[in-house]
Every structure is written in C-alpha cells, then in structure tokens.
C-alpha cells in the first residue's frame, strides 16, 4: 500500500525560481505531448504508447530542460490521459456512458504543472534532499541541483516518489511512501448510515443502537469567512479578477477543508473499528442545495 503526505514549501527565492522553472517546463512539455497524441489520433486513428512518445519528444527543448526521468514521468501522464479517453470512448459507443468524452485538451499557456521525481534520483545529505537537474539547465544557468529539508516524521528509505505540486500561487512537495497493509477486519452485519448537512455536518446512526453527530459550525464559519474576504477584495472589480491575495486565501481555505474532511473521516473509521461496523452508507442527493 502507498500513502501520501504533502508539505508546503518554504525556501529561498533562488530555490523557488528553480522549482517554478521546472514546473513551467513540465507544463510546456505536457502540451507538446498532447499535441502529438492528438495529431496521431486525428490523422491515423492510433494511440501512442509511452515508448513512442518518449522517442518523439527526447529532442524537444522542454524535455531537455528537465531531468530525463522527470520528463518521462510527465509524458507518461499524457499517455495515461489518452488511455482513459480511449476506455471512456468504448463505453460511450456501447451505450454504457451517457456523456460523450472529450479528447484531452491543452493546459493553460504559461501555467505550472506537477513534476515527479522517482526516489532513485533524490539523495539524502545531512538531513536535506538533493534534487538533481538536467544537463541543459546546468549549461544555461550553471546550476545542477537544489536542496530542500527532509521532514523528520518520514522515513527516507520508504519514499518512492517526490512530486512538486503548484497550486494557487503556492508550491507543495508531496512524498509518496510505502506503508504496510492494514489488517483484515472481521465481517459483521453492523451498518453505519451517514446523512450530510450544514450545522449538523454528519449525522450518523448505526444498527448497534449508537449514534453521533459531527458539528459542522466550525467548517461553515471557515467557509463564510473566506467568502466574505473574497467578496470584499473583488468588490468593484470584474468577475474574473484574481491576484496573489485571493490565491493565498483560496489555498488556505482549501487546506482547512481538506484537514476537516480528513479528521472527520479518520474519526468515523476509528469509531467503526471500535464498534465492529464494517459497512458505511453515505447519503448523496444530487442538486440538493439547488432545490
């Protein structure tokens, strides 16, 4: 089994510039890969493989600007998106999918994309992670690596992949690590039903005779504060107005919501394990807010 832990990157301006550069090159390489895959699909009706795209793109300037392993990971992500499109298209033709899938489209010009480093290309030196860069970057800028601190709560040897994730003007480093499989839970007939709401965020009733409610007022308050701040900043401006302050507030709010959901999920899972409940039924009503 694999787990993932995400850390907000606080580093020097030089390191941030380097990370943004490789994420920018990954975005451009992704669009180049999508272009070739689309053209082959439209003109020949064929889907490229990982090996095909690697061979086509290995002389690309954006491929050379990245560590070769990172560039290949980026291109393989493109291939995966076309594999998904192919599978969905088959389901649509069989009448098993209501909405016709769309061919993968290009990423936003000038944006940043995720960059993945396989663990074998990252070294641990005196408590810091050393990320090597491509030869082309060294020729252009005279830099062959950059260094970031290693989190103390993770085992370096268990990490399989490092991902630089740009989001809302912020940079994150994700650590993908291996963890032991969970123990098999004993089968029972007990069920927990969950009804989502607002003030009563999750109302939970079980067949064991026990019930509980997760209070949603804190989550509601955090969301209301965010909406008020955004409304105040955008007052008198166009609907699509965006700046660094909005990006920071949005990212902070998203982190809070993810933390809330993760803690709620962990609480419910632990409760189920303690009360021998193995089946969870979660209420889901489409468009319930609209009605």
Image (cartoon, grey):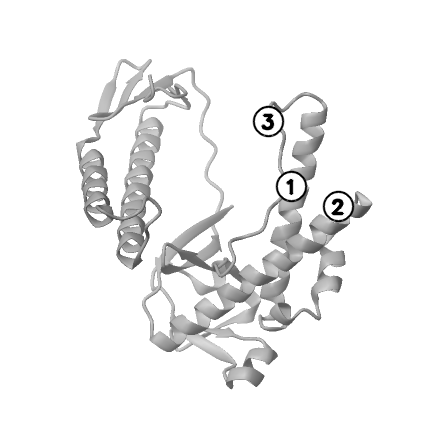
Name the residue located 58 percent from the left edge and 73 percent from the top edge: 65
Q: Secondary structure at mark 2?
A: helix
Q: Which mark is residue 41?
A: 2
Name the residue located 21 percent from the left edge and 30 percent from the top edge: 216
Between 273 and 149, the one lying in front of the other is 149
Q: Are marks 3 and 2 in contact (CB under 8 Å)?
A: no
For the view shown, which residue lies furthest in the right direction?
44
Name the residue located 70 percent from the left edge and 49 percent from the top edge: 38
The C terminus sits in image quarter: top left
Q: For the residue carrying disc 2, how many other residues have a C-alpha within 10 Å: few (<14), some (14-19), or many (20+)? A: some
Instruction: Please state if 238 lies on the left or on the right of 158 as rendered.
Output: left
Q: Which mark is residue 192?
A: none
Between 241 and 16, the one lying in front of the other is 241
Q: For the residue carrying disc 3, how many other residues have a C-alpha within 10 Å: few (<14), some (14-19), or many (20+)? A: few
Q: Is residue 128 above or below residue 276?
A: below
Cα–Cα gap, marks 1 and 3: 13 Å
The spot of residue 148 in percent (x, y) is 39, 71
The spot of residue 147 in percent (x, y) is 42, 75
Name the residue located 46 percent from the left edge and 40 percent from the top edge: 182
Q: Which residue is mark 1?
A: 103
The spot of residue 5 in percent (x, y) is 40, 53
The spot of residue 184 in percent (x, y) is 48, 33
Q: Which residue is mark 3?
A: 99
Q: Tell me if residue 220 can be seen.
A: yes
């Amino acid at each position: 089994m694999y787990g993932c832990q995400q850390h907000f990157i606080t580093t020097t301006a030089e390191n941030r510039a380097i990370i943004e550069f490789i994420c920018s090159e990954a975005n451009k390489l992704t669009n180049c890969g999508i272009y070739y895959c689309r053209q082959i699909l439209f003109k020949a009706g064929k889907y490229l493989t990982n090996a095909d795209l690697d061979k086509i793109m290995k002389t690309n300037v954006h491929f050379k600007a990245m560590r070769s392993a990172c560039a290949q990971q980026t291109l393989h992500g493109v291939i995966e998106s076309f594999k998904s499109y192919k599978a969905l298209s088959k389901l649509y033709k069989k009448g098993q999918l209501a909405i016709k899938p769309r061919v993968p489209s290009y990423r936003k010009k000038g944006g940043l994309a995720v960059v993945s480093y396989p663990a074998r290309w990252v070294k641990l030196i005196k408590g810091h992670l050393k990320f090597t860069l491509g030869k082309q970057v060294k020729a252009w800028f005279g830099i062959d690596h950059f260094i970031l601190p290693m989190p103390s709560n993770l085992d370096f040897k268990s990490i399989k992949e490092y991902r630089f994730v740009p989001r809302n003007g912020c940079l994150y480093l994700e650590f993908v690590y291996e963890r032991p499989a969970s123990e098999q839970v004993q089968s029972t007939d007990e069920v927990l039903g969950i009804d989502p709401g607002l003030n009563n965020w999750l109302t939970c009733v079980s067949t064991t005779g026990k019930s509980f409610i997760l209070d949603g007022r804190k989550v509601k308050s955090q969301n209301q504060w965010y909406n008020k701040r955004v409304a105040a900043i955008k007052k008198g401006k166009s609907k699509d107005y965006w700046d660094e302050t909005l990006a920071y507030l949005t990212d902070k709010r998203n982190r809070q919501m993810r933390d809330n959901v993760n803690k709620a999920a962990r609480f419910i899972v632990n409760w189920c394990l303690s009360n021998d409940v193995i089946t969870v039924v979660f209420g889901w009503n489409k468009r319930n807010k609209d009605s």
